[in-house]
Amino acid sequence: MTTHGDSATRSGVPAVAARTGPSDAAEEPPATTGDDSLPGALSGLREAIGATRYPLALPSAASARRTASALTDQLGDYLLPRLARLDAPLLVVVGGSTGAGKSTLVNSLVKARVSAAGVLRPTTRSPVLVCNPSDAAWFRQGDLLPGLTRTTEPSDDPHALHLVTAPALPAGLAFLDAPDIDSVVDANRALATQLLAAADLWLFVTTAARYADAVPWELLRSARARGAVIAMVLDRVPAEATDEIAAHLAEMLAEQDLDRAPLFVLPETWVDGQGLLPEGVTASLADWFARLAGDADARAAVVRQTLDGALAALHPAVEELADAADEQVAAADGLDERVRAAYAGAERTVEQGLQDGRLLRGEVLARWQEFVGTGELFRTLEARIGRLRDRVVAAVTGRPAPAVELRNAIESQLVTLLRGVASEAAESAYTGWKAHPAGAGLLEPALAHPSDDLPERAERMVRDWQRGVLELVRVEGGDKRFVARTAAYAVNATGLAVMIAVFASTAFIPTGLELATGAGTTVAAQAVLQAIFGDQAVRTLAVKARTDLLARVRTLLDAEADRFLSRTADARTAADAGDGLRRAAGRVELARHRSGLSADGDAQPPGDEEDSG
């Protein structure tokens, strides 16, 4: 431990690493020009990150959204503007816990009260950036931290950046007093993290009472993982405990592989009337920064190490985003599969209902027996006589003709079946989603039941199908041989017979169930129709009508399933988002190596060899 005036510093000020370029290296472009340039690759990565969403409530989603936001901020706040100007002033972000004395330290280093301290914390206020007047233009133009509005007056707006100039601060160096990293104000903590990610050098300020707090160490580990250059200030240390506390903190830094970070120990002391620390207390730290500001090679080394560390950290972070995006797609596929299985089961139930004869029971069977057994079928097959008789019966009795009653019974039976299968499918899909963490977050109570307008849509669908059957009979009647036998017969009667045929599993060849329930009427109708139209014609009509009905049922049920599937659409539209993120990160990594920014070792600010530990 080396003593400088009233302060102590561990390891002095480390020497710059061997890997440094010429003095004008910072002015050279960091990457090749064109589509494969590093800035171009970073812009592409930012677009890929911005286009990826994590809408499903998976365990990885919240973390992915935070990481995506942080990476987007860092790309726009720091990486792209810093790549555009490697020779821009070095930005030192001063961060630390509440009450650590950050603002007092900044004020003391620049020898002016530029940042409010004490009573204003931890209320929200704009961060303060102080620089030499000759560097003000760079920070004023807004390339760095473009999301913060520049202001020359103190502000309570956390989205403003208060710019202050201080002639005592050497050119080439700027301090940014960030909000407390452990502030009780959410906006403060978020802004502090954002600002730290935009630092060329992180100056962490802690106290003898709080140096072991968890929050600073979490950020320090993050900084180390990014390869950033870090310096530490241990403030307000009682004189009698200086050696003990400094040694303990040094051990903690070594455990986190941060033992090369310069550590400055400031004793407990008083502040003057302006709220500044005595110059003797801050002398070693001020001298360290002065030498850094005066050494272009050292500044370039710091910038390149932090920049390269941030670039290198992109790849694993983006890989996590890609994995989270893949999880979104996999979860959406799993949820969709549960819905499709539920509604596919509904389709199969309808198809089985057309095969096992269940639709021939009840009202349909009664109306069909009446239609056939009373001779109505044979009378209405003659179009002219049938139409005349229908009008007479309806006018005298006020009751619809048997053909109309049969048609209504068919419609009612089909609608009842559709409502039942749609209800079962909705309940099954709802239950399947409720058991899945991502699905449960997408549910609404109404999804447990079919759509309110399903009965109306089902009725409309059945009526459209019935009209389609009649049109099918007319079209099939266009065949000359068919017309020769049927021109004089009613299309409606034929259509009803075809609809009944659709309800039979073997295209009007009765099963045992049909014989039992139909009392032979099905056989009688089959014989008549085959005699009139021919066996193959009846089969063809029944098959086509059945295929058309199932297609319409599928459309109806698909619309019901879409109530669920539309909720996973955002996750499904990003099916290749994970691969896109990986490709974008790969292009950045390739451009990074081509740029010459990749560091061979840790670059550190300059120091006097005699002060080095």
Image (tube, rainbow, N blue to C red):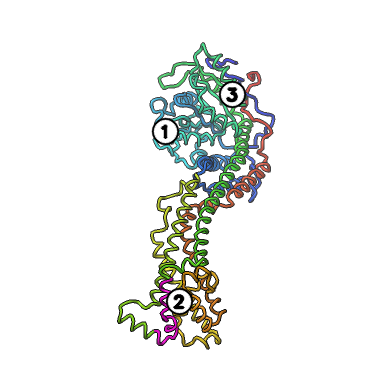
Residue under label 3: 253
271 drawn magenta = no
Say whether disc 3 or disc 1 marks the residue closer to the N-terminus.
Answer: 1
Counting residues from the start of the chain, the first of labels 3 and 2 encountered is 3
- Residue type at the position of mark 1: Val
Residue 156's place in the image compared with 272, above or below, is: below
The answer to whether residue 588 of the structure is visible from this angle is yes
Residue occupying image coordinates x 48% and y 87% = 487
Q: Is residue 441 above or below residue 290?
A: below
Left or right of 123? Residue 56 is right
Magenta region's main secondary structure? helix
Q: CA distance from mark 3 to mark 1?
A: 28 Å
Query: Residue 389, position in %: x, y?
Result: 37, 84
User: Identity of the amino acid at label 3?
Assistant: Leu
Circle on res. 589? none
First reached walking from the N terminus: tag 2 or tag 1: 1
Image quadrant in which you'd find residue 296: top right
Mark 2 or mark 1, which is nearer to you? 2
Q: Which residues are magenta?
A: 365-386
Mark 1 lies on residue: 185
Residue 379 covered by magenta stretch:
yes
Residue placed under numbered mark 2 in the picture: 496
Quarter that holds the N terminus: top right
Asked if labels 2 and 3 touch by Cβ distance under 8 angstroms, the answer is no
Between residue 218 and residue 130, name the one nearer to us: 218
